[in-house]
Amino acid sequence: MKYLLTLLLVFTSVSNLFSITVSGNAFLDNSNTHEGIEVIFKPQSPTAEYANAFTIPDGSFSISIQPGIYLIEYVKEGYQGHSTSQELFIAEDMALTDVTLSSQPLINISGNIKGTWYKNTVYNIEGNATISAANTLTIEPGTLVQFEKGCKLSVYGKLISQGTKEENIIFTSTESTKSSGDWIGIFIYGSRTSLITHSILEYAGSDSEAKAIVNVENSGRLEISDCIIRNSERGGIYVQFGGNAKIKNNSISNMPRGMYCNSGSVAEFNANKIMNCSFYGISEMSTSVTIEKNIISQCDVGIISQNNPMISQNILYNNNKGVEPRQGKPTYTNNTFLNNTYAVHLYDSESTEALIENNIFFGNQYAIKKETTRTGDPKSIAFNLFYDNNNKYNGSLLGFGTIISVNNNNDNCDTYYNLFGDPLFLSTDSNNEDFLHLSPTSIAIDAGDSSKQDEDGSIIDIGAIARISQMPTLLGFDNYSENQSIFKCFLVKNEELVVSIEDISSDYIVNVFNISGIQVLSKRANRNNLIKINASGFTSGIYIVTIADNSSNIIYSNKVIKR
């Protein structure tokens, strides 16, 4: 008996010798006190021993356990439980990552789905889910949709995921420690247009089947806007195999590839912000693609073109290569390139047919870099502004860069009307709301191709962001939106000016002035509240339309724009 007691004491002392302290915090999402959450340590190796602890009111807990491999669970009645997704090897004192238990009900989802999903419920995709061709799934703002590993959502019908700025819809991973590629992605196949707005889509893009978090394929149609798409193993949005997508005002970040459209598909890439893509921001192989007003930074290549796209009004900064035409004959117009290694990289021999016009190149290592094995120069390098680039162009375009003339603003230029001075940006700080906006005295204003106009009817500015002139004071009247509910004017088919007045009791005069304040038309009306004027002879631009009495006193005024 004495011998057995001695062995027991030795075993106990050895066990205590190897005990480890584990601490952490667990919280309840709807309470100011967090006591009573049970933390269970489930042994997964021979040295590990079952143990449990309970949180105190501030949510903290501490427990001594034996070293070994464990799975850890957090449970409390009325809340969703939480467990570590992987086994944890505990060999020394450690603090666990904080955990918060959700009070929202959890519904496990797989198979065919339809109807409405509500924001106070968590929808857990535990197996592949499908919206069939005849069905629609509507998701309320503020709803959380989480996917287990290897799961996806296939849409043959219609998905409506329309959040709000205040309440995003979230598509994410179930993993406690989330990483790119946790789940596969969303596949849009249906010819009925699906809508995704104000949603967050993250931690997907795994499996060879998924090229991106959002995949639009096989005649699928999607409109996606105002979303955050991030942390993909592969890409953000792919439009391929006959897909059709309008992609506007999204934030896409932290992945190899941002957005892609292949041959036979249709895509509009408009006003998206793309950053930190290790391969490219946008790549296109389609004849039916629009790429405009995007902001792309911290990518290996901002835009890869392999067809003949119009690439306009984009800002590309802090990339290795801003744009790279690998095939085709692209047009680059009214873009701004800032602090790239190569702003325009002419990679393919056919790409020397590119048109490069009305762009600003500022602070790049190379503004335009042509591979030395390529022959010929771009079809056009004209009406651009180059400033503070280490190398402007390494080709041999005759006359490029030699100041021999002045442009319409009397600024020095080469024979192609390229300028070589400071554009005078209001800010080059990407966090500033005036980032790459032109100052009022910039030489880029009204310095582009004179055959093209900005919205204010003036000659187009150089660069991605035009400085639109303010409406001038005309005949002492400077409120051009006054009484629009009473006095309306508009153009029909851009050819006929229609003037409508709801409250008129006497004869009046309709006057039309151009943006410079020059009168182009005057017409007397006899108490008619609707008159029509032939505007086919008007040139493109902004016009001021005024209603005056017989003494030339302006009663109402408005403006119209002729395209």
Image: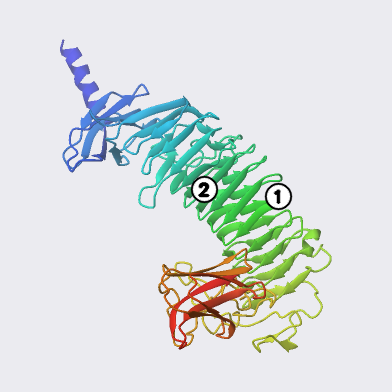
Q: Residue at x 19, y 21 (%)?
A: 9
Name the image quarter holding the N terminus: top left
Name the image quarter holding the C terminus: bottom right
Mark 2 Cα shell of 10 Å, populated few (<14), some (14-19), many (≥20): many
Residue type beneath disc 2:
Ile
Q: Is residue 114 left or right of residue 8?
A: right
Q: Residue at x 36, y 32 (%)?
A: 84
Mark 1 Cα shell of 10 Å, populated few (<14), some (14-19), many (≥20): many
Count of numbered labels shown in the rendering:
2
Q: Residue at x 80, y 59 (%)?
A: 350
Q: Residue at x 40, y 34 (%)?
A: 116
Residue type beneath disc 1:
Met
**Residue 150, above or below 375:** above
The residue labelled by disc 1 is 285
Local secondary structure at mark 2: strand
Viewer-side label of 1, 2: 2
Q: Earlier in the sequence, mark 1 or mark 2?
A: 2
Q: Is residue 312 left or right of residue 214?
A: right
Specify the quadrant of the image occupied by residue 94. top left
* Residue 338 is at least partly visible in this image: no
Q: Position of residue 349 (x, y in %)?
A: 81, 60
Q: Position of residue 162 (x, y in %)?
A: 43, 45
* Residue 316 is at least partly visible in this image: yes
Q: How is the image coloured?
A: rainbow
Instruction: Give the Cα separation between the discs numbered 1 and 2.
Output: 20 Å
Q: Residue furthest top?
A: 1
**Residue 127, above or below 367:** above
Specify the quadrant of the image occupied by residue 15. top left
Local secondary structure at mark 1: loop
Q: Nearer the viewer, residue 214 or 532?
A: 532
Q: Residue furthest right?
A: 375
The residue labelled by disc 2 is 224
